[in-house]
Amino acid sequence: MQYTYLGRTGLSVSRLCLGTMNFGPLTDEPTSHAIMDSAHDSGINFFDTANVYGRAVSTGLTEEIVGNWFATGGGRREKTVLATKLYGDLPGEGYEATWPNSGKLSALNIRRALDKSLQRLQTDYIDLYQFHHIDRNTPWEEIWQALEVAVQQGKVLYVGSSNFAGWHIAQAQEAAARRNVVGLVSEQSIYNLLKREVELEVIPAAEQYGLGLIPWSPLQGGLLGGVIKKIEEGNRRNDRSEELERNRDAIQGFEDLAVELGHSAAELALAWLLHQPVVTAPIIGPRTPDQLDSALGTVEIQLDASTLARLDELFPGHKPAPEDYAW
């Protein structure tokens, strides 16, 4: 495994981040524990979760599964850089999710959500606490004051964002600078060969303010995981047919290029992300130990300039704004 620093921090994280969203709804607890053990065995030390993951089955289910794994000991918590998120509405003590202040980024919900996550995760601190979405109604002065308290209490070490626009990152960092606090150190966004809109303004903002980018959905729901070949072999339903048909020629060319290079399509898609300078670690979300194993070799793949250029021809990206659409 290779490691890098998370944004401008001194925190060392693996070049692949283990996503846990499937733990509970699609992957049972024993298998989830086996996947996390395999991740550690392979050198992955960066795990990502959220307080809303698993809520379709049970509130906080995924965090509970991760917490139960930590509780088995063996240095599991100490060896893990743990990232979780808050924002979505969740039931609290004595009230339901639709009740006021059961979500978003008010100081009240930050305090409540953090304590609940710590309880479910069976730990006394979160390495990276992430805002799952922008809260347009809570001022940054309130948000940062609440996080300053959490940092002073030792409950949070670093703070990150997720699904922010570029100007949200700038707004957050300028407010943090006024308070003389570190502010955001990472942004978690959808980013892959098919979804490159963050290149317009999010990535330039992340670079300007020293944030590491943590891409989610690196395979675009399987469309970059060899979908055409799998459908032809009868191993996959065409459940994203409209998006597939819009991009069929590019995806077919991509799959052909992967064969030419001797890699799977999924390996090529992850390797491309690892070649983007601002990317810290793509999030991989295996449902089985075998799916985890198939992703591990991507950190060793080297793509030359001609291959990167061919991928840009298949999936044209964006220049930073405003040059992308103006002079």
Image (spheres, rainbow, N blue to C red):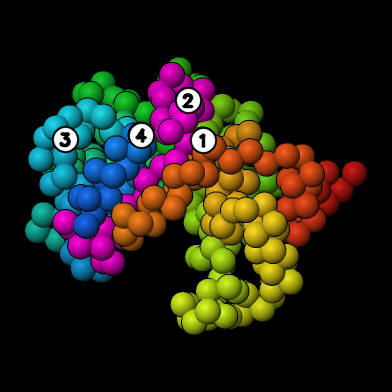
Expressed as whole percent of the image width and height from the top left, the position of residue 85 reads 34, 46
Mark 3 or mark 2, which has the lower sequence index? 2
Q: Are marks 3 and 2 in contact (CB under 8 Å)?
A: no
Q: Are marks 2 and 4 in contact (CB under 8 Å)?
A: no
* Disc 2: which residue: 5
Q: Say which amino acid is labelled 4.
A: Gly
Expressed as whole percent of the image width and height from the top left, the position of residue 141 reads 42, 32
* Disc 4: which residue: 43
Q: Quadrant of the C terminus?
A: top right
Q: Is residue 32 above or below residue 110?
A: below
Q: Say which amino acid is labelled 3.
A: Thr
**Residue 167's image quarter?**
top right
Q: CA distance from mark 3 to mark 2?
A: 23 Å
Q: Residue at x 70, y 57 (%)?
A: 260
Q: Are marks 2 and 1 in contact (CB under 8 Å)?
A: yes
Q: Is residue 14 above or below residue 219?
A: above
Q: Residue at x 65, y 57 (%)?
A: 258
**Residue 247's image quarter?**
bottom right
* Disc 3: which residue: 123
Q: Quadrant of the N terminus?
A: top left
Mark 4 or mark 3, which has the lower sequence index? 4
Region of the chain picked out in magenta, as a range: 1-30
Q: Is residue 155 above or below residue 296?
A: above
Q: CA distance from mark 4 to mark 3?
A: 21 Å
